[in-house]
Image: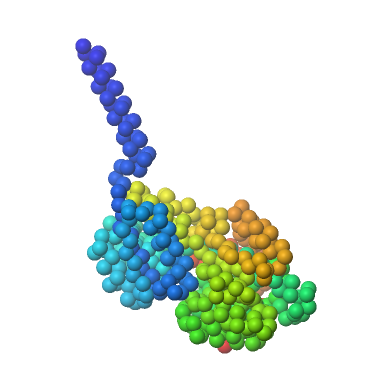
Amino acid sequence: MKRVYITTALTCLVILAVFIGCFRVLNLDGGKDTLTVGFIYDNDESTAYTYNFSLARDAVEKTYGDKVDIFTCSNVLDDEMEEPLRMLAYKGCDIIFFNGYSKMVMELAPEYPDIQFCQTSYMDMSGQKVPDNYHTFKGEAYQGRYVSGIVAGMKIKQMISEGTITDDQALVGFVAAFPTSEVISGYTAFLLGVRSIVPQAVMQVRYTQTWSSYAQEKNAAEQLIESGCVIISQHTDTIGPAIACEEAAESRKVYFVGYNQSMSEVAPISSLVTSRICWEPYVLGAVSAVMSNRSIESVVQGRIHGTDISAGFDMGWVEILDLNQQAAAPGTQKAIDNSVEQFRRGYTDFVFRGNYTGINPDDPNDTINLSEGYRENENTSFPLFKYMLSDIITVIE
């Protein structure tokens, strides 16, 4: 009888061990049946940047349905972050996402150790000591900028070959918000993409000193068009530059390359293509991690820099949208596919490379030689290339 009892006990222990193992594999151990998710936007969905970010919120709602409760606060300025953040914490949020640049998020995170705070990165996070529950993330935007620059370059090449413009009229315009490394990195990558097709192309940049002003952005684009730019792109938040191009297209050939949100509806004649950061992979991964009681960095697929993550085309964090086949030069789709495939294979250091010298506009003694290349987002998700290629880029005051 003792043998029967021992065998029965051992059998029960084995079954229990298997059950516990399966329980853990299925992420049921310590997981959550429902989750409360918060979003805080620096603007609203009428602007391209916030609209693009809101697509991740929509993806969470679609993916998880009634398993998530979602609260959203819009038009929150950086210095007004405390009240909505505390309100979402009071509502029981398990995780909160932010697309603004407020340092207050990192400062308040330790007060709520049971909440995960995930913010689009706004500075170099390498070497930064941050709270355990504070995370940053951003797609490697320079990759999309470079590919969309190829699209623009092919159109300029077509215009030259057809006699619409001459070689020395290969002029690109860029409407920029502020001279931050994020903005400079983006428009430099864009121009280098153009120059990979049209080596003589140069760029004029106009700063608006604001992220979101339809009137200022449209006016800046109009001035660039008046000065002879045949391609306009932007790193600002409204449709102003696209509208300026569409209106100008009625009397002359000028084309627009978008960022964050497709402008094909508001600029169907002039819009060529759009690149965007795709926020969905990170946001969905972070929600899954919290729901299954795992660390975000163990679940989200990307390049991990501590609690900071970045990725590009290889992980679906950057996308090219809405190539206008009616306006684009022949062979453009193939050129896009070839370039994107390079990024997906991990080849990235060809972007910031060439016979160029860059100067830091804040410190003329700080220069960089790109003959050996520069690798963006190597240790942080925030873009750090801050050098002006003065021979080919001119800032118009």
- Determine which quarter of the picture holds residue 221: bottom right
Q: Position of residue 207 (x, y in %)?
A: 54, 82
The answer to whether residue 250 is above or below residue 100 is below
The chosen color scheme is rainbow
Residue in front for this viewpoint, 341 or 385: 341
The residue positioned 38% from the left and 51% from the top of the image is 289
Q: In this view, which residue lies farthest toward the left?
A: 1
Of 332 and 146, the residue lying toward us = 332
Q: Quadrant of the C terminus?
A: bottom right
- Identity of the residue drawn at 71% across and 73% down: 156
Counting labels gives 0
**In this rendering, is residue 242 above or below 146?**
below
On the rendered structure, is 110 left or right of 308? left
> Is residue 390 among the parts visible in the rendering?
no
Tell me the quadrant of the picture where the N terminus can be found.
Answer: top left
Residue beneath the point at 46% across and 56% down = 281
Relative side of 249 to 74, left or right: right
How far from the left and from the top, in percent, is residue 378? 53, 60
Q: Nearer the viewer, residue 156 or 386?
A: 156
User: Residue 130: x percent and y percent?
Assistant: 36, 62
Please name the residue shown 63% across and 55% down the image. Answer: 341
User: How far across and down, in percent of the image, does residue 17 sit?
Assistant: 31, 30
What residue occupies the far top of the structure in this picture? 1
Res. 257 visible in picture:
yes
